[in-house]
Image (tube, helix red, strand yellow):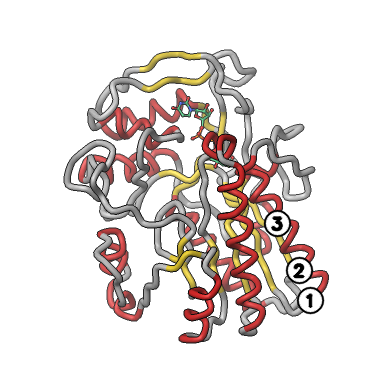
Amino acid sequence: MILEGSFPLLQRCVLATSKNGRNLVFYQVDLCNKDALEQVFTSHHFDAVVHFAGLKAVGESVAKPLHYYINNVNGTLNLLEVMSSYGSKKLVFSSSATVYGQPKSVPCTEDFPLQAMNPYGRTKLFVEEIMRDLHRADPEWRTILLRYFNPVGAHPSGRIGEDPRGIPNNLMPFVQQVAVGRRSELSVFGSDYNTKDGTGVRDYIHVQDLATGHSAALFKLFTTPNIGCTVYNLGTGKGTSVLEMVAAFEKAAQMKIPLRIMDRRPGDCSEVYAATEKAEKELGWKAQNGIEEMCRDQWNWASKNPFGYRPSHADGKGSKPVRNGGLSLRVSNATAVA
Ligand code: UFG
């Protein structure tokens, strides 16, 4: 493995992949730097690309839309152009359930109307549309768009997990920081939704299941010449409320999480969960883990790594950031080229 600098996550990924890890090659390349990207494609031939790279904070995307469009859309355009010119036309892209906006009903099937509600969501939607246009113009492309629901949990070894910088935006990273004493309480955004207990309902999916969903998608790309540009939801098909998720975590960690009920968070919808039949039938994939396993592995990671990949310090000041939009192996903002 080639490491430009010492990223603990990469080293842990190599260990997690056992003997195959020795074959991994890593380049840190900004997708916005097309020349550098071309260099990678001149050094290797890629049978397929799995494209995870992207900024993903909804609030930040509202404040810095150009930053999001440049990174997520321009970066992807560069990747597609380079792939095309090097004859590499198989792609799995990380899309998001955010493209369903406020769905008219649940569960969301892949043919629901699309209506992203913030710049981050629009970058996902625009890339989806670009992929559909590209396939119409050049049927040699085979692409699968995976709409992730709410990824949580961590690698079962407890050595690889999500490590957000600053205040976490998402529920479970926040819960885990309360559990390890980095935050005093969890704000529950809204208790008056028309849901089972008044709190928001989502489809949480274990990251391990998300990973096997990608393997299934890659297999599909190689075995289905007429796949075209096809969308699959990656979710469990089950809706879980904020309070149910907190209760499951409390059980896994054997502790109480202090809560404060707050107003609804602007832009949140009440209830979203996936229809999973299409992925089950066509990819032969189904999520195996429930919220108990998700919370068990989340707590295993958090308790062993209370400050994420840093030895200490709550917000990682002084640590060397990995550039966003780069070609890198990261848990929540990554591109791996295979
Ligand atoms: N929530 C809290 N307190 C928090 C954080 C979240 O109560 O501190 C609640 C939210 O209001 C929501 C639920 O927990 O009801 C889940 O919120 P997340 O922020 O974890 O996830 P979202 O469903 O809002 O969004 C996530 C990703 C998006 C992605 C979307 C797809 O962050 O990138 O799922 O549905 F697009």
Give me the disc on residue 134. 2
Ligand 1 neighbours mark 2 (CB distance < 8 Å): no
Q: Is residue 289 visible?
A: yes
The quadrant of the rendering that contains the N terminus is bottom left
Percent position of residue 150, x then y = 52, 42
- Quadrant of residue 32 in the image? bottom right
- Circle 1 sits in a helix, a strand or a loop, which is it? loop
Q: Are marks 1 and 3 in contact (CB under 8 Å)?
A: no
Indicate the amino acid at tag 2.
Leu
Q: Is residue 156 visible?
A: no
Q: Nearer the viewer, residue 108 or 102?
A: 102
Cα distance between the residues tagged 1 and 2: 6 Å
Percent position of residue 96, x then y = 61, 48
Q: Which residue is mark 1?
A: 138
Q: Which residue is mark 3?
A: 128
Q: Residues within 10 Å of mark 3 (few under 14, many from 20)?
A: many
Q: Nearer the viewer, residue 125 or 144?
A: 125
Q: Residue at x 75, y 70 (%)?
A: 228
Identify whether 268 is placed above or below 204. Answer: above
Indicate the amino acid at tag 3.
Glu
Disc nearer the start of the sequence (1/3): 3
